[in-house]
Image: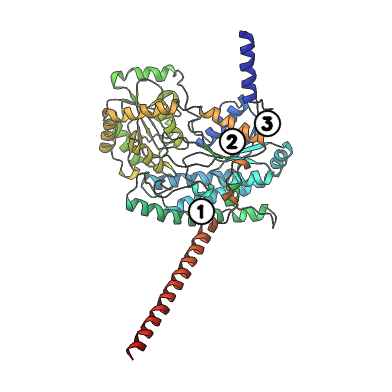
Amino acid sequence: MAGERKLCIFLFITLQFPLLQTAKILTICFIGGSHYLLLDEISRILHNNGHDVRMFLQFGEGMLPGYKLPPSPYPVSTYSLDEKYLKEYKEHFIENQKEFLVGRRGLQSILTFLGELSYQCNVTLHQSDILKFLKNEQFDIAIVDAFNPCTFLVSEKLGIPYIAFFPGIFGNALRVGIPTPLSYVPLFQSQLTDRMDFFGRLKNTVTFFVSHIIGKKIDSIFDNVIEEHFPAGSRPSIADLHLKAELWLYNVDFTIEFARPLLPHVQYIGGLLAKPAKPLSQELEDFITESGESGFIVVTLGSMLSSIPLVEFVKEMNAGLAKIPQKVIWRYQTSHWPEEVALAPNVKIVDWLPQNDLLGHPKVRLLVTHGGMNSLMEAVYHGVPVLGIPLFGDQYENMVRIKAKNMGTSIPPEQLKSENFAQTILEIIQNKSYKTSAMKLSAIRKSLPFPPDQQLLRWVEHIVQTGGGGHLHPYSYQQPWYQQCLLDVILFVTVCLTVTVYLIVTLFRVLIQKICSSGKQKQN
């Protein structure tokens, strides 16, 4: 009897979750840093669950300063850009970092960066041998880094259906057609929360119209690439390629993001890199032990920022850290530490640090971060308060959400001085409300019905099994914009009301004239 019951349960589970044959999956990553870490994790998850995975990778070595890439369990097709160009690009990137550190972060810097991506895309699409090889592999699906428009173009060139993975918050919601009520869903770059007053809603509305203009400007940066590599009559647009994705996956969840409506083919899988902590090296453990009851803090400004190009900024940070009782583990490339700055006695600098494992240590008190989504998701997972020093991109928006959730606060880099840096660190550590909020968010995060790796795996397999995500796409993708906004209906109703009012007014005017004329005839 017990055996029959087990057999029934097994058959039920098998019918509920039919086995999927090995799928051939291509992951596409053309940016280093956290983008590579995420796409690598996605590739490993799919590979470890029996799928045939290959990554198309651009930069190769040097994508993560100070980090030693572990052996890849899946094959990688990679190439490098011209060394002269890479040198110039690195110098340009450092100059941009300097601008961000002094508070200059206008639209032009974003457009310039996307211009570099467009140039790199042109080089990528000229890699005829690799592209021919990948096309002949006949992949079932591609998973692309949706931050870089070039990944869409490469998938289109290869003729592979694709799933778009976006490495942050719903910053491109308007482009994906996600419902975005402006009264309570703050748009990207508005730096608003979901609780907007009148002027907040006004700002959000203005941002809505500006976003459309900026979106068209960004798309036009890739026009020359499209014209060169796609024949006339079948040239895609970046906007259409966004809507063509079978599925959209976002590296966020609602522990950080504000609650908002989503479409069926839009899923969130934030926190792929956040995991139970592993033991630290003996060197780091010995350093932490010296902290006593004060504990330690982790300082890192992103996977791509291995050092800080402004000495004055380093001096202020270092002086501020010297004023706190906690030990400090700071990711900073040791060979680039400025000789004129004496390292604070409570600070240890390392070329690379195991951030997730440090945040899972019982003596950690705070994470000082640039506000990248991976760092914030790891902090949420382990219940660690955050002090943000946002530099560019989505980092300011991310920190708005952290502040709204009372998990931490931020200091704009141009306002960072040793005194306010130290005082803010101590305020977050000593004010227990930040830790309480962080632990509450951690509990929410850990109690989600499915972990992000399982969400990723199930959704990818679902798309492959069903031959695409068309059944999840709304009909609005096929409607012109004026129908989506009901402008035709509004115009029709307006015309009907106008005609009706006109007829009523005309009728009353005729009646009044007749009444007046009959009255005059009686008097005569």
Q: Identity of the amino acid at label 3? A: Ala
Counting residues from the N terminus, which is met first, the one under dot 2 or under dot 1? Answer: 2
- Residue 82 picture quarter: top right
**Res. 135 in view:** yes
How far apart, in angstroms, are the residues tagged by discs 2 and 1?
30 Å
Residue occupying the point 59% across, 46% down: 150
Q: Identity of the amino acid at label 1? A: Gly
Secondary structure under badge 3? loop
Residue occupying the point 28% across, 35% down: 424
Task: Give me the disc on residue 60.
Answer: 2
- Residue 440 picture quarter: top left
Q: Is residue 232 above or below residue 384?
A: below
Secondary structure under badge 1? helix
How far apart, in angstroms, are the residues tagged by discs 2 and 3?
25 Å
Task: Give me the disc on residue 23.
Answer: 3
Counting residues from the N terminus, which is met first, the one under dot 3 or under dot 1? Answer: 3
Residue occupying the point 58% across, 27% down: 45
Mark 2 or 1, closer to the camera:
1
Image position of 182 (left or right of 78): left
Secondary structure under badge 2? loop
Mark 2 or 3, closer to the camera:
3
